[in-house]
Amino acid sequence: MTIEIRGAVELPAVREDIELTTSDGLTLVGELALPESGAPVATLVSLHPLPTHGGFMDSHILRKAAARLPALADVAVLRFNFRGVTSPRGRSEGEFGEGIAEAADLAAAMDFVTARGLPHPWLLGWSFGTEVALKFGLRHAVDGAILLSPPLHRTSPEEIAAWEASGKELLVLVPEFDDYLRPAEAAERFASVPSCDIVGVEGGKHLWVGETQTKRVLDEIVARVNPAALPLPAVWE
């Protein structure tokens, strides 16, 4: 049977409900999705959109990355709820930390990556998640960060500029019609990081709605973390 890969289709993977423990004693809930056979070639640590506006570990791009990329690209996907956030997986303890306390949430996720020996970790931030990645990602042994729709509300110019000297890769996907930051302004705001790759996505909006936009985002992610897996297939046998 042939299945078209779109929408809520979930491809085969080894999926494990996990818990993360933060340095301030909170338990965060999440999921690790691994390739069904063989070791992953890279790892995505997913940082979800703003909790106060409905962001959680199941925000659709992150959920679809976990549903598809272990099978299509041999990529491990770690998703979790930031502190105080609820999803069908459960509720993470604590309360929203305004993008500051979430530094401990990211650290707990990276401790888990290290403990499990997951290879080549990349931060995958979306909206609010990009702020956490930019502010605190350089504290950790990551290959780089992939930013979806960065609003740059909480990130200082100094925090952005620090990425240039870090040697870590930075990919910024900016929707043409984003609500907060559009491609031309993004080029100005990231000018202090000339090595970063800014990709303006025609027709894109902040929430990346629709299969065309989903596919574009997943293609860009895989092009960075495991280009040998491209092109991603549109059907699953």
Image (spheres, rainbow, N blue to C red):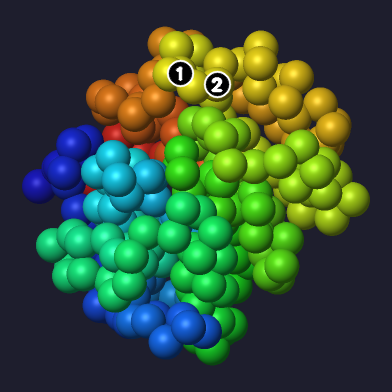
Q: Which residue is mark 2?
A: 181
The residue positioned 55% from the left and 21% from the top of the image is 181
The residue positioned 38% from the left and 45% from the top of the image is 49
- In the rendered view, tell whether residue 106 sits above or below residue 100: below
The residue positioned 44% from the left and 75% from the top of the image is 38
Left or right: 84 with respect to 158?
Answer: left
**Picture coordinates of residue 111, whole percent (x, y):** 55, 82
Asked whether disc 1 touches disc 2, contact meaning CB atoms under 8 Å apart, the reply is yes
**Residue 64 in view, yes or no:** no
Q: Which residue is mark 1?
A: 178
Residue 156, picture quadrant: top right
Q: Residue lying at the far right in this picture: please name it.
A: 165
**Depth check: 102 or 178 in front?**
102
Left or right: 148 with respect to 14?
Answer: right
Q: Residues within 10 Å of mark 2 (few under 14, many from 20)?
A: many
Q: Secondary structure at mark 2?
A: loop
- In the rendered view, tell whether residue 118 sits above or below residue 2: below
**Picture coordinates of residue 129, whole percent (x, y):** 48, 49
Q: Amino acid at mark 2?
A: Leu
Q: Amino acid at mark 1?
A: Asp
User: Which numbered circle lies on residue 6?
Assistant: none
The residue positioned 75% from the left and 30% from the top of the image is 190
Report how far apart the C-alphas of labels 1 and 2 lie in the structure: 6 Å
Q: Secondary structure at mark 1?
A: loop
**Picture coordinates of residue 112, whole percent (x, y):** 49, 81
**Depth check: 46 or 190 in front?**
190
**Depth check: 226 or 124 in front?**
124
